[in-house]
Amino acid sequence: MNCTVEPTAEPHFESLHRALDIVAREKKYLALTQAPPLAKSIDFYRGVISSDFPHFVALDGDRVVGWCDVSPVFGHSRQHVGVLGIALVPEARGLGLGTRLLQAAIGKSWERGLTRIELSVRADNAPARMLYERLGFEHEGLLRRAVRIDGAYLDCHAMALLRQPEQALD
Ligand SMILES: CC(C)(COP(=O)(O)OP(=O)(O)OC[C@H]1O[C@@H](n2cnc3c(N)ncnc32)[C@H](O)[C@@H]1OP(=O)(O)O)[C@@H](O)C(=O)NCCC(=O)NCCS
């Protein structure tokens, strides 16, 4: 698979939504267990992009095989913060694409003026935790019973990456 990583744009939306549905239905990684209606996903993608927050896709030809976004948080005192989401369809994992997507999203976050990227990751998701740690995210605590899937509770780790002073662009 010879993929490119590109900023997300309107022509990617339907394929991105299909990729979201595939990963959500695995029930192992995301808060969703299936994609929302397409129109709702499109509203979300447009909202992230129009506020100049990071949204990147990994493309295999025209097909979206993964994405990474950093979305805004509600509240005047939280405007320096973005919440990270990342995922690849199963056949695109373990090829270095997650690293490329995450690096692109981090770079754009700092360029955008954010100074904190936060996320939560299920305690049983070792590959994602290792990727975040490799790129400098630090653990901030355990969120107990943060998700419930098919009646079973699971803990999540709260993690965050702070922009270092030398990365400040202003
Ligand atoms: C997590 C995810 C985005 C990582 O992307 P990826 O392209 O598979 O990861 P990369 O190939 O860039 O690998 C980066 C690092 O991740 C870790 N990693 C990736 N796959 C791994 C695996 N199967 N087991 C353990 N660590 C793994 C390693 O630290 C790896 O570094 P290394 O190559 O030096 O060993 C991807 O596996 C995925 O989409 N998983 C399902 C969705 C998900 O978990 N999203 C995050 C929810 S919080």
Image (tube, rainbow, N blue to C red):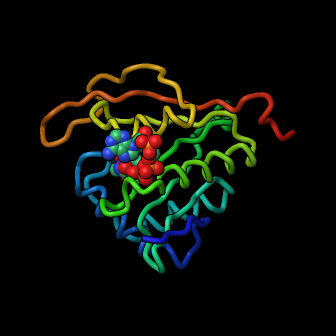
Q: Is residue 82 left or right of residue 42?
A: right
Q: Indicate the quadrant containing the C terminus: top left, top right, bottom left or bottom right.
A: top right
- Which residue is found at the position 23% from the left and 49% from the top? 27
Q: From the viewer's side, name the closer residue of 1 and 164.
A: 1
Q: Is residue 162 left or right of residue 138?
A: right
Task: Give the image location of residue 53, x and y in percent.
Answer: 64, 53
Q: Indicate the quadrant containing the N terminus: top left, top right, bottom left or bottom right.
A: bottom left
Q: Find the residue positioned furthest to the left.
A: 151
Say which quarter of the image contains residue 14. bottom left
Q: Is residue 2 left or right of residue 170?
A: left
- Which residue is found at the position 49% from the left and 32% from the top? 133
Q: Is residue 19 left or right of residue 102?
A: left
- Which residue is found at the position 35% from the left and 24% from the top? 143
Say which quarter of the image contains residue 106. top right
Vertically, is 135 above or below 103?
A: above
Task: Give the image location of residue 107, x and y in percent.
Answer: 68, 48
